[in-house]
Image: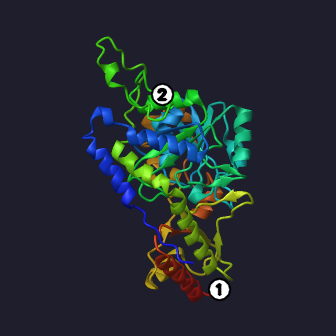
Amino acid sequence: MEKDITRIGEKERAYVLEVLDTQFRSSGSSIMTKQLEEKFAQAFGVKYAISFVNGTATMHAALAAAGVKAGDEVIVPPLTMASTSFAVLHANALPVFADVDPGTWNIDPASIEARITPRTKAIIPVALYGLIPDMDAIMAIADRHHLFVLEDDAECFLGKYKGRMVGSIGHAASFSFQSSKHMTSGEGGMITTNDETLANETRRFNSLGYATVGAAAGKGKITKDTIQDPGYERHVSVGWNYRMPELCAAVALAQLEHLQELVDMRIYVAHLYAQALSGCDWLVPQAVPEGYEHTYWTYVLRLNNHGSFSWYDFRNKYKELGGDGIYAAWQLTYLEPVFRNGSFKPFIAPWHQEQLQAYGPGLCPTAESLQPMLLQFKTNYLTSERAKRAADVLAQTIDYFGR
């Protein structure tokens, strides 16, 4: 099966030129943004989609819109990009780390429940590598404890959970359009939700607290007629300027219009890697429970060889045989220097600093055992030839060490 695609094509170029042709006049602004938000909401089966400058600002805004504030706690996984936890700090709240499931590597609902305190206000489950966590269990916990659930779906586009679209299950969901993601506009992001009040508050937070912005698609700027009134009072709350530029919206819109193709290519590459694993029991893929659809932002294997050779030995041999290299999993967020040395503390309430988790080894044992053993393989190949070559090198590397 030959499967070649173009990531950035003529449609992206045409949409960008259409924006440039407006000369950035106010009358021509937000045309692409409005279309992007409308079509994104339709594609993900939600009522509202609000575009952002990046996929960290999304989470900051959604948490603030949900009322998360100084002194509150938000439960997060440690095995993911630190942006998830940083967004909590941006909201002046405290990230509390729950351990992960040993098979799916996603946040463990039992560990979430064990971390809940009277200060807990929200949970951010991350769809790690393209696989959503156990959302039924997480939503049940949230319902019992009256918590806000924000899906971090930066790595999962068009994934499914028991027949439901990833991004439509929590109270809100965050997507990233950073350059490595399934769809990209270089940078950018989106919040999805079915809650009109939350959507209105999120929009206001990302648009300088303007009085007349709202949940509806493209409703992120004030109108020319409005600002020509000398009595107009613009700002009803403090907000940030987190709006997506129209040029980025143009690229993202074109990407959205062939998103299924982009996602399918990554799934195709993942299947090639899976075939290369045949007969090898010391490389363990991420477990995909029944009813879940993985979209493989990257294809990840756990090295389970009981120390007969190292992670570096495998990576070096893979490169020697012609592979593009293997990415390591992020250092666990609470083991990063910013948490170990306490430099995050100015973001949280001084009185809350006395009740911190002990950020150090032993906090999340499962995640700590997994992180050094994870091998992340690229799936963003655009041609069958390059994808098959990567899978063939993986097979050769496995053969070198012995199946």
Residue 296: x and y in percent read 57, 63
Vertical comparison of 343 with 130: above or below: above
Which label sits in the foreground, 1 or 2? Answer: 2
Quarter location, residue 21:
top left
At mark 2, the secondary structure is loop
Is tag 1's residue or tag 2's residue first in the polypeptide sequence?
A: 2
Do we see residue 68 in this rendering?
no
Q: Amino acid at mark 2?
A: Gly
At mark 1, the secondary structure is loop
Vertical comparison of 213 with 86: above or below: above
Kindly report the distance in space between the C-alpha atoms of the residues bearing marks 1 and 2: 58 Å
Question: How packed is label 1: few (under 14 Cα within 10 Å), some, or many (20 or more)?
Answer: some
Q: Nearer the viewer, residue 13 or 234?
A: 13
Q: State the residue lying farthest toward the top.
A: 231
Identity of the residue drawn at 49% across and 43% down: 190
Q: Residue 403, labelled with which disc?
A: 1
Residue 14: x and y in percent read 34, 54
From the image, tell me which residue sits under label 2. 214
Question: How packed is label 2: few (under 14 Cα within 10 Å), some, or many (20 or more)?
Answer: many
Q: Are marks 1 and 2 in contact (CB under 8 Å)?
A: no
Q: Nearer the viewer, residue 357 or 381?
A: 381
Q: Is residue 237 left or right of residue 95?
A: left
Of the 4 image quadrants, the one containing the N terminus is bottom right
Vertical comparison of 27 with 285: above or below: above
Of the 4 image quadrants, the one containing the C terminus is bottom right
